[in-house]
Amino acid sequence: MSVHTSHPDIIKRLKRAEGHLRSVIAMLEAEKPCLDIAQQLQAVESAVSSAKQTLIRDHIDHCLEATVREGKQSTAESLAELKAITKYL
C-alpha cells in the first residue's frame, strides 16, 4: 500500500468539522438563532465533503493506479472498485 500524503490534510479538515459540530450542539443547547445554527451546520457539511473528496481522489490517483501497475489486481477488479468508490463523490 502506498503512503497517503493526503491523510494529514484530511485529518485537519475532519478536526475542523468536529469543532464546528461541537459548536452546533452548544448552540442548540443555548437556543441560539436557527440561522446561526444552519450556518455552522453548513460548515460541518462542507468540511466533511471536502475531506471525503480528497480521500477518494487520493485513492483513485494512487492506490488504484498502483494496484493495476503492479499487477496486484486485474483491470476489471480495479474498474469495479473505481465504480464503487466514485458513488460517494
Image (cartoon, helix red, strand yellow):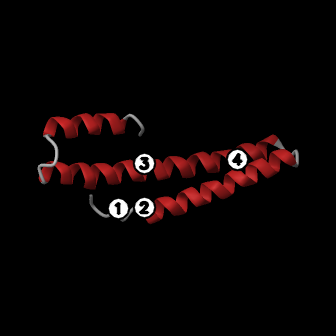
The residue where tag 2 is placed is: 7
What percent of the width, then of the height, locates residue 22? 72, 53
The residue where tag 1 is placed is: 4
Q: Disc 3 and disc 1: Cα gap in Å?
A: 14 Å
Q: Determine whether the residue tagged by mark 3 lies in a helix, strand or loop.
A: helix
Q: Determine whether the residue tagged by mark 2 lies in a helix, strand or loop.
A: helix
- Foreground disc of the pair 3, 2: 2
At 80% from the left and 41% from the top, the residue drawn is: 34
Badge 3 amino acid: Gln
Disc 2 packing (10 Å; few <14; some 14–19; many ≥20): some
At 61% from the left and 54% from the top, the residue drawn is: 17
Is 18 positioned to the left or the right of 70 in the image? right
Q: Determine whether the residue tagged by mark 4 lies in a helix, strand or loop.
A: helix
Disc on the earlier residue, 3 or 4: 4
Disc on the earlier residue, 4 or 1: 1
Q: Tag on residue 53?
A: 3
Disc on the earlier residue, 3 or 1: 1
The residue where tag 4 is placed is: 39
Specify whether residue 5 is in view. yes
Q: From what the image shows, is residue 50 above or below residue 85?
A: below
Q: Residue furthest right?
A: 30
Q: Do residues under tags 1 and 2 come within 8 Å of each other at their CB atoms? A: yes
- Foreground disc of the pair 4, 1: 1
Disc on the earlier residue, 3 or 2: 2
What percent of the width, then of the height, locates residue 32? 85, 47
Q: Quadrant of residue 4?
A: bottom left
- Foreground disc of the pair 3, 1: 1
